[in-house]
Image (cartoon, grey):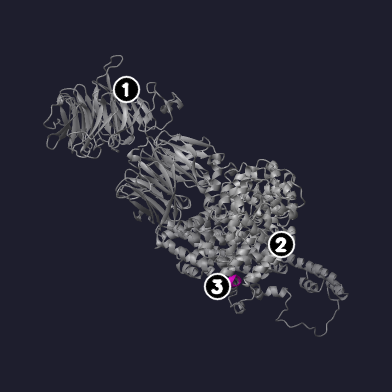
Amino acid sequence: MKIEEISKTSTFAWNNDPLPLLASGTVAGAVDADFSTSSSLEIWDIFSATNSKDPIFSASVDNRFYAIAWSKPSEGRSKGVLAGAFENGTIELWDVQELITSKDLQKASIFKSSAHSGPVKTLQFNPLQEHVLLSGGSNGQIFVWDTKKLSDPVAPGKAMTPMDEISCVSWNNSVSHIFATTGNSGYTSIWDLKSKREVLHLSYSANFSCVAWHPTQSTKLVTATGNDSDALILTWDLKNANAPEKIMRGHKKGILSLDWCKQDPEILISSGKDNATMLWNPIKGEKLGEYPTTANWAFHTRFAPAAPEIFATASFDGKIVIQSLQDTSPPMTSKVTTKNDNDFWNEISTTETQQPVFTVHQAPAWLKRTSSVSFGFGSKLVSISLDSDSHSVVKIQPFVKNGAVSETTSKFSQALKSNDFKDIIEARISDARHSKTDKADWEILSKLSGVGKEGFLKEIVSTEHEQANGKKPDVSSEDGTEPSRKEEGDNDFFEQLGESPIKSIPNFVPEGKFSIDTSDQSEADKTIIKLLLSNKIEDAISACLDQKKLSAALVLALDASPESKAKVRNAYFTNTKGDEIARLIYNASSKNITDIVANADVKSWKEIAAAIAAFSTDESDLSSKITELGDRIVQASENPSTEDRNNAMICYLAGNALEKIASIWLRELPEYEKSLLESPDDDVSTPSDAHFKSLNNFMEKLLAYRSITKANDTLGGPSIEPICNAILEYANLVAGYGQFELADSFLQLLPSDFAGLKTEKDRISRASGTKVQASNTRSTTSKATASRSYGKSPVPGASVPPTLPGNQTFAPAASTPYGGLAGQPAASSVLTPATPSFPSMPQPPQAPVSNRPPIASTPSIYGKPAPVGNPYAPQGATAFNPYKPPAPVAPEPVSAPPPAVSGPPKPAYRQETEGWNDLPDAFKQKTSTRRAAPAAVVSPSLSPALPANNFAPPKRNSAVAGPPPKGSRSSSRTAVPTIPTAASPSASTAQLHSRYAPPQSFNAPTEVSNGSGSPTPSVHAPPKNPYAPAATSSTNLPRNQYAPSVPTPSVQQPQTPKIGHASATPSGPSPNGPPKNPYAPTAQQVSMSPSGMVPPRTGSYGAAPSGVTAPPPPKVGGVLPPPGPVLTQPRSRNASAAAPVELTPPPTKPKYPAGDRSHIPEKSIQIYTSLDSLTQAVKPNVPERFIKHAEDMEKRLNFLYDHLNNDDLLSDDAIAELKKVCSAVEAKDYATATQLNVDFATNHSEQTGKWYPGLKRLISMAEATL
Amino acid sequence: MVTIANAHDELIHDAVLDYYGKRLATCSSDKTIKIFEVEGTENYQLTETLVGHEGPVWQVAWAHPKFGSILASCSYDGKVLVWKESPDRSWSIISEHKVHQASVNSVSWAPHELGAVLLCTSSDGRVSVVDFNDDGTSTHIIFEAHKIGVNSASWAPVDTKSPVRRFVTGGSDNLAKVWSLDASKSTYVEEAKLEGHTDWVRDVCWSPSALVRSYIATASQDRTVLIWHQDGEGKWQKQKLTEELFPDVCWRCSWSFSGNILAVSGGDNKVSLWKENLQGKWESAGEVDQ
């Protein structure tokens, strides 16, 4: 890449700066257009920030240069020494610093010599001894100069070969007293300054023009020939100087200049009379590239010694071109030519029209990093180093900083597990030497944990009395369990005003005589007496008040009307304004201590606290008041003292104001951290230790408090964010140390919608390799867990295979940012980045499918899993793969005529396929059935039904559920009704479809047509072959999976099951076949199973083994779910036509997100708690190879919970029955449980769903393991 | 310890774990990138070899998973490729960024709060910042940062309240420079020049935690590592990691996640660990077993 160009016909030298300067001197042997003989010396700062186009130094000199050399900086020569070799034989040295600052050539000149008798052609400073300069010139003269002594030069000794003009000299890079020279005599001579002689010479058929040493190996060098006829670069090893090692051809004419890169032996640059500048790998003997040619001989080329990325080439066309080694820019044509100076890269001179020709694969050594290190999540350190063979080895090792952290966290972890913080509290009390407040906190916590919350408040109050009254509080003798509010009882004021009798004063009994004579009374008294005697109490009270006889009025009012009482009370308070006691009386009598809390002097906070305790009506009132008190304590002064703060803390603790407490703690964190830093401690050796420890302390306090107060909900509240952030940070830190479990337990505290929580959880669960369990008892948190995320997909269907997670995380969101790039369906972009992919994906496929609503839903389920790995969706999955748009499907509406069969479609639910859900032999005896299953593939009835159920439950699926279908959908519905009659056959097919969607469905239809009819009409759909191909595979799969399940959905009727199997077997073969031919025989399978019920089928199936199916139980008719599905098929056709429309309908979502357990109504909560605890009990006992079954079971049960949470599936009756099942299982009465469960399916088949197999499995697993 | 040997035909230049610490991406002079699943403490499995670069691949970087399973790589061929894993686990190139005229020496994704933003540094002396937009397009700003070449860059941790684009670059001009985005002009402004090294700055690394004091570590060809922090007046002050010279070139430096440990890898084939003591000095925290 061209960087700069200097318009001078000059030779040049770089200095050793990383941003090198370049000195140029007008070269001898060339004449300008005007025949001027002037000569100049310039210094250029090409890489300066200002990027001036002008030299930083320029001066005229008397003669022209053959060579320039620039030494490294040396003592007293901060910018080194510049040496010039002139055509007149002079050598002159300048101090560059002086040149640049004084701009005075003469002043900067250090030395000048005419030792050479003819032109001096070449110069080089010794790379190891900066002050030693070597020069060569005509007449075989070679001199060694010492720029320190500045004395006359010395000759290197005696030559063995004839010397004529020396054209190039080169110091050995490793041995400072060895150098090489070459000249037109035909030899390259190696000299040893120590022995003062030429020790060796190389010769070749051509004349040498230049020589350069290997950057590190002392015996290797490279020479070039100047012959136009045979322009070669030769590499030599002096260990055998007889012949070159490598010969590199490429230049078309004689080579004039060579430079072997000091930093990379595999890079060498050359230029010559062919105007070319070329890059070589002299070790391998390869040409690497060629730079744009100049318009005339390129006579000098050099790397910048300290910036080998850069080199310059001088040519006789009047330019020095500075360029970088590499240029990856696009071909010239796409470059914009500009004259803008700032854009000089784009400035392409007309003479250099070509781009460098390059093989970029060989990168220079200085870019090849040989070692590296990086940290990874979970306390991992990745490093790269070289092994003994110089091969890279990557190592990932655990990285544990120090023991302190893990010790701290392990204690914490234990406490959390056992929910017992006593040890920690004790440890901290004795250990909290860093901060008084901290110690106080722990003491408070200790007290709190000792006496419990109730007792704690009591204690505050009681100590208050002690101090206030200076006597032993009576309370201490009280029964500790007595509610604290009673304790304050000893406040006399309150008692006197209250209802309680005055203990110490005996009842008043009037004694003796008295007079009512009013003569000596005042008028006012007379009035009162009169009123009293006439029993006009109310008036008497008024009179007393008028007379300021408050006490008399009060006594009177005791028996008077409430109004009067109020009046007197008002009068009393009005008259006693400013009197504290009166104020308290006011508050006490009104039973409202808001005034006290808000206005009383907080110095008496304990008294206030006591009052709060005494007067609060309930827990929340108490909490809010005492918290308010805490606020007041804090706000009372601008700089609350430690005591204030501790007092406030007590109030907050008593008031359960975790937010406030935590925010105080958080505020103090930096201080605490600082105190840790200031006091030496074994655990704290770095600032970050202190940070960690202070956070740890905060977390310990927080969790200790929660543990003591038995709080186990997630945090919440408006000002919770800083606390959550702290928790998140801590969890992050802990996770960073590899303590995933601990970290996860902290994350449980956070509200599930807290920003960043999901990511963090996800990360921890993935990093630790443990799946976050969906069953997590903390419902709120569970939402956040990775597994839960699936729940959001439109289909609640649990079926998502556990294996997926991996993909998910990566796959999903990804699409968004980059949009289409990924090659994924655009649909994905819809998703928000964070969301797990599921939801989005499914959609595309659905559309096509749309025919049947149920189907739509299904795809989503399987869609995701796409990854082959999915155990449950094996083949089918592939077929359905959401990413491969099932384009074909959508197409046409087959046979439109959906017989509007009937009304309301029935819920598909019923089916229960046991098939793939079935427990392995280990758990159950069913083996035989299982076996059959595979073969049975076909067994249409069962399998289909099941799937349908799973996916199609009306309520859930948006698409499916679609409430009563309108328009397009209608068709589908219509189908439903059919159920009773023909339904069965079709149903099965339908179901299949639904699951796998598009492809398969069609087989079924075909058959239908065969069949007689009733159901069939719709069925015919088959025309749509489009689906066919896919169908085959898919169909088979489905069946297999479900086939095994003997029990089949139809549970109720024994017969059906059999049928199913029977049919299955026969059909076996067909499955494959059918798919292809829509109408084909294959159909049989389809039809068979379901229905058994309808007569038509048999007919229809005729050919097919289906006959078997026959047994349509009457009951079924009503119950049968299959019909639902069936309908779908017909629709599908229709639908297909309509498809687009249908598809679109947005899925109705459950009221609450999947995973939410917080809205389970009272009536059904027992089901959840019971099943969930059973699940948890069972899981650990499940043999490893059945783990997947257990996971699936759990997933299915989660669907049930979702339903319960939304209260959208089970009727009250059903719930009652389920409860019975639960009870039976809990009682380990598995036989009953199983029976009840079967009954449930019988009685509420429409309410079973994908969850049902989960329950079934749970029962059998419980039986096997508990 | 997981040891992966003979994974590539030539030198391996970078190896990075993904966000979850479960997958390792390596890149090599053999022009390929390989992805390994790392299981437990012993096992690993090669799952993918990404071929697409025409020169040695210098660095790889995993994007935050919220953007998907995405990897960026840079190469001597002057290109930055962005790879994405699709749900069927196949990888493809979803973006090719080739505005640089020479080797691209580093790539790093911005903190995820800033979006899908990639920072690239090149031997052409320039730095480019590429924004990948939601609609699949990308836009970039490119500017001159260090003459002769930019070797590395590192993003500043983000203050979540006011996310600002800020990063440090290290170059062949022996300097490190701190840059921040001037949004009004859509340009990056040089905030500070960190002068102290006497040879190429090979690597720069900004400590990750915004809570503890923020540091920049710079590793250099001059066999030193400098630690920089801003004083009260916002000036960057430097401190030598150690007074002694390292035995060889310092190739890389990397902060641990909590920002308390600095790892330095050098041409001597060793990785050393460093921590700050309470006196504010940096002291050895051991060497990594090689």
- Residue B41: image x %, image y %? 42, 57
Query: Extreme right residue here?
Result: A534
The subunit carrying tag 3 is A
> What secondary structure is the magenta-colored segment mainly?
helix
Q: Which residue is mark 3?
A: A450
Element under disc 2: loop
Q: Which residue is mark 1?
A: A8
Query: Extreme front residue here?
Result: A1103
Amino acid type assigned to the residue bearing label 3 in the image: Gly
Query: Extreme bottom residue here?
Result: A512
Residue A282: tell me if it is visible.
Answer: yes
Mark 3 in CB contact with mark 1 (< 8 angstroms): no
Start-end of magenta stretch = A449-459
Q: CA distance from mark 3 to mark 2?
A: 53 Å
User: Mark 3 or mark 1, which is nearer to you?
Assistant: 1
- Residue A1178: image x %, image y %? 56, 67
The subunit carrying tag 1 is A
Element under disc 3: helix
* Mark number, residue A1244: 2
- Residue A538: image x %, image y %? 84, 70
The subunit carrying tag 2 is A
For label 3, the crowd category at 10 Å Cα-Cα, with few meaning under 14, some 14 to 19 and many 20 or more, is few
Residue at (30, 31) in percent of width and height: A269
- Residue A289: image x %, image y %? 34, 31
User: Mark 3 or mark 2, which is nearer to you?
Assistant: 2
Amino acid type assigned to the residue bearing label 1 in the image: Lys
